[in-house]
Image (cartoon, rainbow, N blue to C red):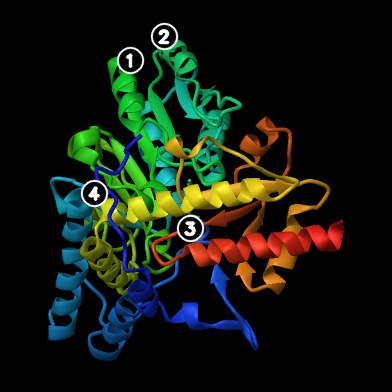
């Protein structure tokens, strides 16, 4: 995994001042301790203002109008494509497709590339730690096309079994689709190695970067990955916006996704022709204000630096793991800190995860409880749900201490 070359300290108090929601009291006198960024991140003022400003001063539909506002909105929307490309190390803005979320980005690949390229008996390799967003689309395609799904096993240590992966490569899969970072175990997968081995076996690769891009420096060119999918809302941007990156040659060959306005060159009653990527994958009016908000989110992340953000999240997660270990009855899932970051999912002996979350909520501590849209990985560990605390650039060690204090209250209440 990537370890930071040097530990850079974030000025967290200054960062926190940029996030208005962090000043909220969940009840009078009970300040919010937001430990749920794996579900969705909070938004800095610059993102909120960019969207607000768009609606106040330039709202217009894009690509169609010739009036001043339409031209400005089109230019601003298209400029964010270039910004996203640079942020993930992609060569060209046109390799960036805007969707609704990570889930839709992966479904786009399954429904276009998958339908065109996968046939009965073809093998698709996933991992046992996938979010449902990178599992169900392939299960749907398996039902439709008769493709065969294989899974890289997850060990007791929360790591992928790379020896088993090497054996799976002998089946000559057509696609390997895997998470860059687990939203339950926090595992940072060996992405470069997974991609290299997949390519050696002749497979196309898709990386679910929903948790990876917000927390890890990510370079698609260095990784040589074919597709990545991620969500704006997990990286300080607004909801309703996802991103799909693809290699140019593959995007050019893929059929379009949804049909309608904006993705076509010409339409007659007898048929249509479609545009080049990225437009052929973006039918209808897109999430214009959200794209502009994402641009501001990337500016914010870049100003701090992804290396520094990773170092901070990693250090805080390590601290949380140490402190969680002190609490009798708490069992944290996933690998040791060398291989994980940003979240800690745990069980509390004798107490249902929802009850844990409810008592933490009374103390203002916001965490998630449930299966986190990753039932199979819970089943693998013989459980149905966990409580998950997650950390981002605006979280502090004091907030981890508040989590631990509230967990002792759970212990008191449930004995
Ligand atoms: N993949 C992973 C690893 C995730 O953590 C999530 C969301 O939690 C998703 C996919 C789905 O993201 P979205 O709900 O934004 O489509």
Residue 331 picture quarter: top right
Distance from label 2 to label 3 (Cα)?
38 Å
Q: Is residue 32 visible?
A: yes
Is residue 191 toward the left or the right of residue 387 in the image?
left
For the view shown, which residue lies furthest in the front direction? Answer: 326
**Disc 4 packing (10 Å; few <14; some 14–19; many ≥20):** some
Q: Position of residue 287 (x, y in %)?
A: 35, 69
Q: Element type at marker 4? A: loop
Look at discs 2 and 3 and give the one toward the viewer.
3
Q: Element type at marker 1? A: loop
Distance from label 4 to label 2 (Cα)?
31 Å
State which tag comes first along the sequence, 4 or 2: 4
Which residue matches tag 3? Answer: 391
Q: Position of residue 22 (x, y in %)?
A: 48, 77
- Which label is found at residue 88? 4
State which tag comes first along the sequence, 4 or 1: 4
Look at discs 4 and 3 and give the one toward the viewer.
3
Q: Nearer the viewer, residue 12 or 359?
A: 12
**Disc 3 packing (10 Å; few <14; some 14–19; many ≥20):** many
Which residue matches tag 1? Answer: 201
Which quarter of the rendered picture does the N terminus lie within?
Answer: top left
| Residue drawn 37% across the image and 52% down it | 215
Residue 361 picture quarter: bottom right
| Residue drawn 37% across the image and 55% down it | 312
Marks 1 & 2, CB-CB < 8 Å contact = yes
Which residue matches tag 2? Answer: 170
């Amino acid at each position: 995994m990537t370890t930071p070359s040097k530990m850079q300290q974030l000025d967290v108090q200054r960062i926190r001042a940029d996030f208005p929601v962090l000043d909220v009291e969940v009840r009078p006198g009970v300040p919010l301790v937001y430990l749920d960024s794996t579900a969705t991140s909070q938004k800095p003022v610059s993102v909120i203002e960019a969207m607000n400003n768009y609606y106040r001063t330039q709202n217009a539909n894009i690509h169609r109008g010739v009036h001043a506002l339409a031209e400005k909105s089109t230019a601003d929307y298209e400029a964010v494509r270039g910004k996203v490309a640079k942020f993930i190390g992609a060569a060209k803005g046109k390799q960036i497709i805007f969707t609704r979320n990570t889930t839709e980005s992966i479904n786009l690949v399954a429904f276009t590339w998958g339908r065109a390229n996968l046939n009965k008996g073809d093998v698709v390799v996933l991992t046992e730690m996938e979010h449902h967003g990178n599992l169900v689309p392939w299960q749907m395609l398996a039902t439709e096309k008769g493709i065969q799904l294989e899974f890289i096993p997850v060990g007791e240590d929360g790591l992928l079994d790379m020896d088993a992966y090497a054996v799976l490569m002998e089946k000559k899969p057509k696609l390997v689709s895997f998470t860059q970072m687990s939203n339950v175990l926090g595992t940072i997968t060996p992405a470069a190695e997974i991609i290299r081995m997949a390519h050696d076996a002749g497979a196309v690769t898709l990386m679910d970067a929903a948790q990876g891009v917000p927390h890890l420096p990510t370079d698609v060119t260095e990784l040589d990955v074919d597709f990545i999918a991620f969500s704006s809302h997990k990286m300080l941007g607004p909801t309703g916006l996802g991103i799909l990156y693809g290699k140019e040659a593959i995007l050019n060959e893929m059929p379009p996704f949804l049909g309608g306005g904006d993705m076509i060159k010409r339409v007659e009653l007898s048929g249509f022709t479609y545009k080049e990527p990225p437009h052929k994958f973006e039918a209808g009016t897109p999430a214009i204000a959200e794209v502009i908000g994402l641009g501001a989110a990337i500016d914010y992340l870049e100003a701090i630096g992804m290396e520094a953000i990773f170092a901070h999240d990693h250090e805080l997660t390590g601290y949380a793991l140490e402190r969680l270990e002190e609490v009798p009855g708490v069992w944290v899932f996933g690998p040791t800190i060398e291989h994980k970051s940003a979240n800690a999912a745990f069980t509390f002996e004798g107490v249902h995860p929802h009850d844990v979350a409810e008592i933490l909520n009374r103390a203002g501590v916001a965490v998630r409880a449930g299966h986190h849209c990753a039932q199979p990985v819970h089943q693998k560990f013989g459980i149905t749900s966990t409580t998950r605390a997650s950390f981002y650039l605006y979280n502090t060690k004091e907030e981890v201490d508040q989590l631990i204090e509230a967990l002792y209250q759970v212990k008191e209440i449930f004995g």
